[in-house]
């Protein structure tokens, strides 16, 4: 066998080998962190049938020409839209009722896929596919150490300080069990006017699979979603005009070639606040829109399917839904000016607007708007923010702009949308501000679009060099490869140190290291009490706790552990996030705080239990790590070194 052939085979083998190795590392991390193999298998089966196969069936009706990774991306969005609608109508009757429409459609989709006689014979992938699989394997590795292991259960870690955004999302996943409207687990009786679909889907699948919301969201959900996101970026890059090699490189670059100190790797490897899922949703919307404009006469099923896909994106991440809507509007305006406007473009934009409007009317309008317009006050910060986001992506995008402007009249509608997000995301980041820095999601959505918009220009440059300056083409390819390797190494200087937390968690899971608890730490006793409450209470029970982060040094009203671990609603576990997501709570929260403080810190034992019963509280959860915790005389129903749990007698 010739040397070149050996190198070619080795390259084609590298991707599948990396994917298998990354998958094994991820699986080991899931099992070490507290996941179960049977639960994982059930979760994966439900994900495949109720979301992917259901969506694949619908996209087959709506866009029959969409194939491969592009169809899977659109299928995920369509299946998620079906799940959202089914939960809204049927969720009060349980997870299986909410999943029933998706399972029925998924059965039809799976049967259709089997009729297509998919090729199951193992074969080495082509070079570009192998490169994409290499990135997928790396994603699974870093997700295991940055996303899964740091979220291991306290039962395994014994002592740990958790990311509260993770616990907030786990609590949201548990809230899926209560049906519409979506409830805030941290304040029983209040509605969460929030983009909850990422958490809802993971919670419903976990509940049907017999797993907890913690395991479903923290361990099982994001690995397949992240792989689909990489595939969606690859498919979208190809449809925009990049070749297969550049498309694979661009997909990996979004995950692995950002600047040092960029927020992007953290969100894409951990899926914090659903950003990775939202990226997949945005790609699905653009892919379906692009295919719809290719059809001479699109099927009637396209229009409701596109509406469902846009609604799913809005309910995964409202900021990205708003960006998509603005991008459609901008693309329409450019198409009008260039004389290329088609009625179908206006119809797609109208459906996107209708989906966002429906989500606003049903969900978002009940929230407090803390995203404030700051005008030009922060424009001076924008250059540094762009460089810190993705320097190479920014440079390539700026270099591609002359090419894009020169052929503005020939850009497709999808290319116009991508460029609109590439420019509009940073603009929105600079013009708006939020006390929790939520405006960063506008910028994070723009980074992938820089790469996607630049890749067709790079492909055109390669073709021009091949035709006019063939000797320079290898040099240009080498320069691009060197720049990508430099960007990859630059990001690794951030990513590898961040994975140390996962290594520390793995050592604790193995019993090789023990930590001293800090003020914000969660102990194994907290986990045991929360799980006991879950197993010995009714689903509708409400507990109150003295640990709501008011009495700690870093008191910011953010503590979400007991609701996440117990899957039970709290009278008041934390309060800051609710100031954003429910108008009624923002007006009345002071009363809830006063009642909670009275129960745990001011009243006598009998008065405290009487007031708790009057407020509809079923359990009192006392953390012994909070200074001044009440040492009541009655025997607790359950006790650990960290918690005392008391059943509240019914009011007489």
Image (cartoon, helix red, strand yellow):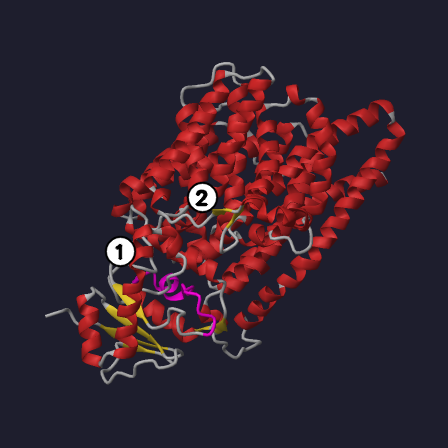
- Could you tell me residue 366's position as x and y percent? 33, 46
Left or right? Give the position of 137 relative to 299.
Answer: right
Q: Which residue in the rendered view is the most extreme toward the right?
A: 471
Rendered view: 537 above or below 383: below
Task: Determine if the magenta segment contains residue 249.
Answer: no
Residue position for label 2: 316
Which residue is pictured at 46% across the width and 28% down the height? 59
Q: Does residue 16 appear anywhere in the picture? A: no
Local SS, label 1 = loop
Which residue is pictured at 37% across the width and 51% down the height? 581
- Residue placed most toward the observer, 461 or 131: 461
Query: Which class describes the residues within 10 Å of circle 1: few (<14), some (14-19), or many (20+)?
Result: some
Q: The magenta stretch spans which residues?
A: 553-570
Left or right? Give the position of 352 relative to 461.
Answer: left
* The C terminus - image quarter: bottom left
Residue position for label 1: 189
């Amino acid at each position: 066998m010739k040397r070149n052939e050996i190198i070619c085979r080795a390259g084609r083998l590298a991707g599948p080998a990396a994917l298998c190795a990354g998958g094994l590392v991820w699986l080991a991390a899931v099992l070490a962190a507290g996941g179960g193999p049977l639960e994982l298998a059930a979760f994966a089966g439900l994900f495949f049938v109720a979301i992917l196969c259901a969506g694949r069936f619908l996209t087959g009706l709506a866009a029959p020409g969409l194939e491969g990774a592009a169809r899977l991306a659109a299928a995920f969005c369509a299946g998620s839209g079906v799940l959202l609608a089914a939960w809204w109508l049927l969720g009060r009757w349980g997870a299986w009722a909410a999943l029933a429409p998706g399972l029925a459609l998924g059965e039809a989709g799976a049967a259709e896929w089997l009729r297509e006689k998919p090729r199951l014979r193992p074969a080495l992938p082509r070079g570009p596919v192998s490169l994409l699989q290499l990135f997928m394997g790396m994603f699974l590795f870093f997700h295991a150490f940055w996303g899964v292991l740091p979220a291991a259960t306290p039962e395994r870690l014994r002592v740990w300080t958790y990311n509260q955004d993770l616990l907030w999302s786990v609590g949201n996943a548990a809230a899926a069990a209560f049906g519409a409207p979506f409830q805030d687990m941290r304040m029983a009786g209040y509605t969460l006017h929030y983009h909850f679909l990422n958490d809802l889907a993971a919670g419903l699948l976990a509940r049907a699979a017999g797993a907890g919301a913690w395991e479903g969201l923290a361990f099982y959900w994001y690995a397949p979603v992240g792989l689909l996101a990489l595939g969606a970026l690859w498919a979208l890059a190809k449809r925009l005009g990049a070749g297969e090699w550049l498309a694979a490189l661009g997909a990996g670059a979004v995950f692995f070639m950002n600047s040092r100190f960029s927020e992007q790797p953290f969100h894409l490897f951990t899926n914090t606040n659903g950003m990775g899922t939202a990226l997949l949703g945005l790609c699905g919307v653009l892919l379906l829109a692009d295919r719809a404009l290719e059809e001479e006469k699109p099927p009637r099923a396209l229009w409701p399917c596109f509406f469902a896909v846009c609604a799913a994106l809005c309910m995964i991440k409202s900021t990205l839904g708003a960006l998509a809507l603005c991008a459609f509007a901008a693309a329409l305006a450019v198409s009008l000016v260039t004389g290329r406007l088609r009625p179908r473009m206006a119809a797609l934009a109208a459906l996107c607007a209708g989906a966002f409007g429906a989500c606003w009317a049903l969900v978002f309008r009940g929230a407090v708007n803390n995203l404030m317009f700051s005008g030009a006050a922060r424009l001076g910060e924008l250059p540094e923010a762009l460089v810190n986001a993705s320097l190479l992506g920014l440079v390539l995008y700026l270099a591609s702009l002359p090419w894009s402007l020169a052929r503005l009249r020939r850009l497709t509608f999808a290319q116009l949308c991508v460029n609109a997000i590439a420019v509009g995301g940073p603009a929105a980041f600079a013009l708006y501000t939020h006390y929790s820095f939520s405006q960063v999601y506008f910028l994070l959505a723009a980074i992938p679009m820089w790469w996607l918009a630049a890749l067709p220009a790079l492909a055109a440059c390669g073709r021009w060099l091949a035709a006019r300056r063939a000797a320079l083409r290898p040099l240009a390819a080498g320069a691009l490869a060197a720049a990508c390797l430099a960007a990859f190494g630059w990001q690794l200087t951030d990513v590898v140190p961040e994975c140390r937390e996962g290594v520390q968690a793995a050592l604790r899971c193995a019993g090789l290291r023990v930590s001293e608890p800090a003020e914000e730490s969660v102990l194994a006793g907290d986990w045991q009490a929360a799980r006991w409450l879950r197993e010995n209470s009714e689903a509708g029970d409400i507990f109150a706790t003295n640990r709501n982060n008011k009495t700690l040094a870093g008191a910011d009203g953010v503590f979400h552990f007991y609701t996440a671990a117990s899957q039970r609603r709290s009278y008041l576990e934390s309060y800051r996030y609710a100031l954003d997501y429910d108008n009624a709570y923002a007006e009345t929260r002071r009363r809830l705080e006063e009642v909670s403080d009275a129960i745990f810190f001011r009243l006598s034992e009998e008065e405290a239990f009487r007031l708790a019963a009057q407020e509809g509280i079923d359990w009192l959860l006392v953390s012994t790590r909070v200074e001044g915790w009440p040492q009541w005389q009655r025997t607790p129903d359950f006790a650990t070194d960290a918690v005392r749990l008391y059943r509240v007698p019914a009011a007489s």
